[in-house]
Amino acid sequence: MAEELELLDRWRRGDDGAGNRLVRRHFHVVFRFLSNKVGDEATDLTQQTFLALVERRDRLDPAIGLRAYVLGVARHMLLRHLRGRYRDRAVFSPERVSAFESPPDLGTSPTRRIAQGQDRVLLDRALRSLPIDHQIALELHYWHELGIAQIATVLECSPSSVKSRLFRARHGLRRQVERLSTRPSPLLERLEDELSSLRSFSGG
């Protein structure tokens, strides 16, 4: 972590070599984080994320870690992008709105192309149907294995709020599985294991 903080500081002072090293380490994580929500638009948003990362001057808490910090910046870029998409609505809330106005086309999902078995496909669709911050909370917990304090940093909320969001996200995910599946019981019984298994498809 200390090395990455030094690389970030050097990048912000104009050392492009340090920046290239950081980008190589975190590009795949950021791209997967975004592509699961905006598809083909993820490339531009990933570039915007790293541009914002070098332009920011806020202090980074070493206890949080650079991955959580970078994903927090990526979330900012994502929400700014989605606010533009939902600009005709009176209120945009990542706690209420999915990244998809309609269920995503599973044929274009990276997870869909790799996944083996309909349960994993269904779970991917159910996850992507959740409100944005609920989807993010589950991904950070199960895929990136971040702690409560780190997730709170990404979502810009208190640790107690993270626990509440994870509870609601799990409940919402179960409801989506029940809605989308003709035989939800077997999948629901092993839901947490299946969520963790998606880590290998997430790039995390």
Image: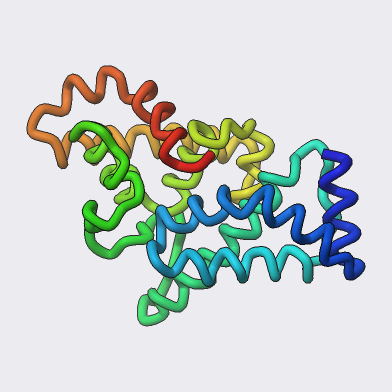
Q: Is residue 24 above or below residue 57?
A: above
Point out the residue furthest to the bottom here. 88
In this picture, residue 200 sits left or right of residue 89: right
Q: Residue 190 in the image: x percent, y percent?
A: 30, 19
* Quarter the N terminus occupies: top right
| Residue at x 52% of width, y 56% of height | 31
Q: Residue 51 in the image: x percent, y percent?
A: 70, 70
Q: Is residue 121 above or below residue 71?
A: above
In this picture, residue 25 sits left or right of residue 4: left
In this picture, residue 42 sits left or right of residue 7: left
Instruction: Count the marks.
Output: 0
Query: Residue 10's quadrant in the figure?
Result: bottom right
| Residue at x 65% of width, y 50% of height | 26
In this picture, residue 195 sits left or right of residue 75: left
Q: Residue 37 in the image: x percent, y percent?
A: 41, 57
Q: Residue 197 in the image: x percent, y percent?
A: 40, 27
Point out the residue furthest to the left here. 182
Q: Is residue 120 above or below residue 50?
A: above
Front residue of 189/108: it is 108
Q: Is residue 77 above or below residue 96?
A: below
- Residue 57 can be seen in this image: no
| Residue at x 57% of width, y 53% of height | 30
Front residue of 56/43: it is 43
Query: Residue 132's quadrant in the figure?
Result: bottom left
